Amino acid sequence: MQKIVGAKIRRLREDIGLTQEELARAAGCSNEFISLLELGKRDPSLSTLTDISRFLKKDISYFLSKKENPFDVLLKKREYTVLRSILKEFQIYCRRYTELEEMSERSLQTAPLYTHLSAERMADQERRRMAPGRFLNGRLFDMLELHGLRICRQVYPKESKAAGVFVFLERRQAAFVSINAHLSVERQNMVAVHAYAHYLRDRLDGPIVDNLDIFIPEYLTLYPGREAYAQTFARHFLLPGHHVLDILDNDLRVKNPEAADIHYLRRLFSAPGDEVLQALFETGRISKSSLQRMRRHFPHMLRNGREGAIPKDIDNAAEELLRPSIRYRSLCVSACRRKKIEREQLKEWLYGENPAPEIEENPVSDPEEGN
């Protein structure tokens, strides 16, 4: 509760542009106390919290009450009607996942809640914490999951403009993201890391539906500031500037990269072409005019338009309506070995309504390990 109250105060203070000193003066306490309060290391007295809530124009219950279930919030909103079946399926997945963690005694540690770092510094710090190496191909989802963001992929309706859905279950202290499986592999990676930024910084703000428009610079400015922050984090996490420059200088050996070089970097870092272009612009390797020219001349490669955001090269894995993570499958098998669930329930939780292959009498590993 300390961390939740502190995070809410910090977010409100930053939203209205107050310094800690100004809030401390209004609440009649020290700067140090406000700093410790926002870090979740101090509890405010009822009197102090009343003063703070009055100054921030919030009812005191805002800081003390628990949030509504995120799925209840999402399912009430008319704008998400097209996602209703997806959200219900995702809700079942989240419930089963947390139950499996309890059965298997394999809970994940929740990542720290960041408050004061820039998106670039947070990306650098998380890369150092995870130590993933230069490239993340084939390992990204598993790595993010082991650091607390549980992932599944779902086939969203074609008429949906959503790229992914992030929820944080406060009671379970469990974060989840559902990713639109219609997107290219590179774009799915971007959605996953974007959601990871929400997990590290915005998880107490309620559920978040990320639309495809957040990947279009002209539309990104229309969304809350957290989206631009998460997008910057994702780009710097997937495409660290020093790694990009190292490939340009020591492998490609080019000063002015062109389309073929961008395609190579896209595959190497498993990142969308438009994000590669932005990274090249931020590292000073292409000018603003070159950035605009390449975006205009290579839409088939960049796939960044409103209609082109869902690419033609649909991932073959999207044939299943819901594709659970490798860790989820491992948890299912672990629960079955412990006799917490029966074999028929194991099949249902692994494959849903899809035809399931025969499962070994005494399964010892993930039936789809390595896929």
Image: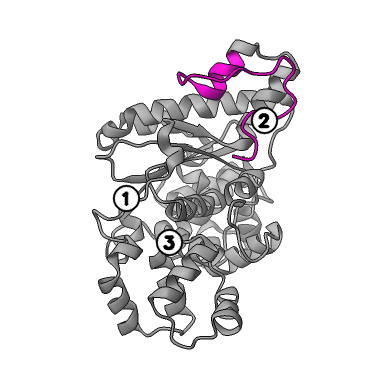
Query: Does dot 3 land on a helix, a strand or a loop?
Result: loop
Name the amino acid type tagged 1: Lys
Is residue 211 shown above or below 325? below
Residue at 43% x, 69% y is 263
Percent x, y for residue 100?
Answer: 64, 24
Which is more N-terminal, label 3 or label 1?
3
Q: Within the magenta stretch, is there residue 362?
A: yes
Quadrant location of the C terminus in the rendered image = top right
The numbered dot on residue 312 is 1
How many callouts does the rendering have? 3
Alpha carbon separation for disc pair 2 and 1: 31 Å
Q: Do the residues labelled 3 and 2 touch (CB within 8 Å)?
A: no
Q: Mark 3 points at which residue?
A: 272
Residue at 33% x, 44% y is 162
Q: In which quarter of the image is residue 305?
A: bottom left
Q: Which is more foreground, mark 3 or mark 2?
A: 2
Q: In which quarter of the image is residue 107?
A: top right
Residue at 61% x, 65% y is 31
Name the amino acid type tagged 3: Pro
Q: Is residue 45 visible?
A: yes
Query: Does dot 1 land on a helix, a strand or a loop?
Result: loop
Tell me if mark 1 has few (under 14), some (14-19) or many (20+) residues whose alpha carbon lies within 10 angstroms of its own. Answer: few
Percent x, y for residue 74?
Answer: 36, 33
Which is more N-terminal, label 2 or label 3?
3
The numbered dot on residue 366 is 2
Quadrant location of the N terminus in the rendered image = top right
In-image side of 210 versus 371 (left or right): left
Percent x, y for residue 211?
Answer: 33, 49
Name the amino acid type tagged 2: Asp
For this orientation, the residue located farthest to the bottom is 255
Q: Do the residues labelled 2 and 1 touch (CB within 8 Å)?
A: no
Is residue 344 shown above or below 269? above
